[in-house]
Amino acid sequence: MPRPVVVLVGRPNVGKSTLFNRLAEERLSVVDETPGTTRDRLFAEAQWNGIPFDIVDTGGIDPTQTGPGHTQQPLSIGSADFIKQIREQAEIAIREADAVLFITDGDSGVTPADHEVAQILRRNQHEQDGQPWPPILLVVNKSDNEMRRTQAYQFYELGMGEPYPISAFHGTGTGDLLDALVATFKEQGEETEDESVKIAIVGKPNVGKSSLLNQLLGEERAIVSDIPGTTRDAIDTHLDFGEIPITLIDTAGIRRRGRIEPGVEKYSVLRSLRAIERASVALLMVDATTGLTAQDAHIAGFILDAKKSTIVIVNKWDAIQKESHTMDDFTQHVRQDLNFMSYVPVLFISAKTGQRVEQVLPMTLRVHEERLVRLSTSELNKIIQEAQDRHPAPSHVGRQLRIYYGTQVRSDPPTFLLYANDPKLAHFTYLRFLENQIRETYNFLGTPIHIVIRARR
């Protein structure tokens, strides 16, 4: 079931990011030592009373504009530019969200900007089952003491219902807010089981994702344009490849966070990341004319975080002047830059001319099959034992990791549970060594392997 999306909306400096970090604190504190996997977050997972949901921090609506020479010219609250910023942010939030947290500042009281946001939110709510949707909860932040909590009643004038006084910094009042929030989530009914292979086409803007989709479908199903950012939504398209049902998810391009424009494009990135979560295999498209960039590696890290299988698709290969070793050299660069995903296959295509596009779906289905493979317990333990005999784990403070036995506990993605004397002795470099030993027996082409170490009771 898809997780509900909760969007934080409000003017600058009301504490949206502080509340975001408090709600997502446990998730964001996870440290991964795998090289290349530390990235900025546009959204995060949170949960309350066992109910998971996604939270999105829209960032403050800044009533300034950048003029010549990078000077900041203040805009009046009623100016057309400021109201346009508010409207774009609020309309997008309310269209994408399952619930909205409208954040205000109890220290400064009700402001004209708060009235602007409230008016736009009300205007864009729609009726569903006789109730306003999405639900909007009015949050009065910085209510750090009893006097400010009492003064929160003044926010009733916004016409957004009961205000919830909280302190995002100290955490007071957030429990009542979250109780009310999760109560608004609609109960998800049973959905029809979708057995199709789900493939997300992802990459930077203007690398040819929609062109590839059209080639795979044999028709102009998606709009193709040279203007980056044409595709705003994640679009699902169904087709049958032989007797195998496939769902292709074409997404908006993912840009570096600092270059994401506020408004529509920011939420296009959010939808792209959610598309990766829904897919089994991600086709990471790279522009051959620019080579693999840091942003391509950044996107690959998002895919790895989601533990999805991957194929690197090098597009626009027809535009490259080639020599006998051009393809091998390019592949070597990909392997170097994506050294944390050394298992991924690389295909060179031209979505414009159709060159080698016929290889994409067969390779994708092969990678999907590898994702579902299970190794027998006896075979896995033989691999682990031989690996330890060949290369014992390095000792730490006079102690050495010793793995006794293991088993594959799931596929999709392949996950191995290993029992050892002390999991704290398992350095990530040794886990990478064990992963390589497993792949020597079975490659798991294009698919990440997840290894979990537990202490033997």
Image (cartoon, helix red, strand yellow):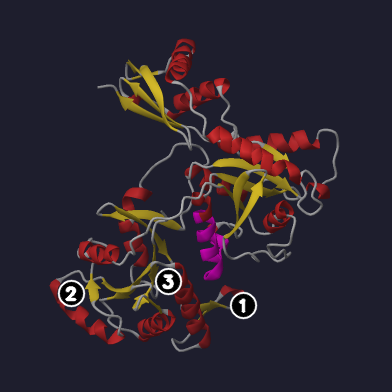
What residue is pinned by disc 3? 60
Q: Viewer-proximal residue, 45 or 106?
A: 45
- Does label 2 or label 1 sit earlier along the sequence? 1
Magenta segment boundaries in residue numbering: 258-274
- Does label 3 or label 2 sit earlier along the sequence? 3
- At mark 1, the secondary structure is helix
Give the vertical position of 287 relative to 105 (above or below): above
Closer to us: mark 1 or mark 3? 3
Residue at the extreme bottom of the image, as rendered: 78
> Looking at the image, do the residues carrying marks 2 and 1 touch, with CB atoms under 8 Å apart?
no
Closer to us: mark 2 or mark 1? 2
- Residue for point 26% across, 82% down: 155
Q: Viewer-proximal residue, 409 or 452?
A: 409
Count of marks placed on residues: 3
Q: Left of 335 or right of it: where is 270?
A: left
Magenta-colored segment: predominant secondary structure:
helix
- At mark 3, the secondary structure is loop
Of the residues shown, which amino acid type is indicated by label 1? Pro
Residue at the extreme front of the image, as rendered: 243
Give the vertical position of 364 relative to 381 (above or below): below
Residue 150 image point, x, y percent: 15, 78
Q: Specify whether residue 272 is painted magenta.
A: yes
The numbered dot on residue 68 is: 1
- At mark 2, the secondary structure is helix
Of the residues shown, which amino acid type is indicated by label 3? Gly
What residue is pinned by disc 2? 149
